Image: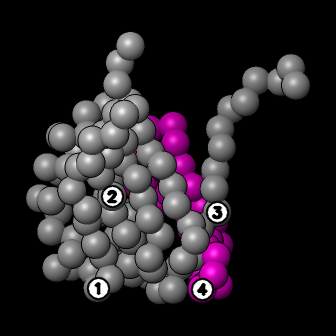
Amino acid sequence: MSQKIISIRPFIGTGNFELSRSFYKELGFQESVLSHNMSYFSNQELGFYLQDAYVKDWVDNTMIFMEVENVEEYWKELNALDLTTKYEGVRLTAIRHESWGKECFVHDPSGILWHFGEFFKT
């Protein structure tokens, strides 16, 4: 393929659309409402579509990896948001060190697993 790729935008579902909209705005994403049941959330030049659609097997098996510049700083910022108190079902998992780098994890209010990682610089 010779065409330049501009972006990749996954579609993710949610069990509670309004709650998830609030959650992702708190994570620093900007919302663009596309219709009554779909929004585009972006941060810098990256983004995803949030749908008011819930299929348990789909949502329970959705994982998204987002590379961040400094996972330790990102982890501090995540903890400062107090997401587990504000949003039922949200879970944070501390930084793990892997052979390729390090990452921390967040389960969103619907159970979607986000990996926030930093690759070792070579």
Looking at the image, which residue is at 40% across and 32% down? 100
Amino acid bearing label 3: Phe
- Check disc 1 and report the residue beneath it: 88
Classed neighbour count for the residue bearing mark 3: other residues with Cα under 10 Å, few (<14), some (14–19), many (≥20): some
Residue extent of the magenta highlight: 29-58
**In terms of secondary structure, where does tag 1 sit?**
loop
The one of 29 and 8 positioned closer to us in this rendering: 8
Tell which of 114 and 31 is nearer to you.
Answer: 114
As drawn, is 31 to the left or to the right of 2? left
Residue for point 23% across, 45% down: 74
Residue 103 seen in this snapshot: yes
In terms of secondary structure, where does tag 4 sit?
helix
Quadrant assignment, res 53: bottom right
Spatial CA distance of label 3 from label 1 is 22 Å
Q: What amino acid type is highlighted by mark number 2?
A: Phe
- Place of residue 84 in the rendered image (x, y in percent of width and height, measured from the top left): 21, 75
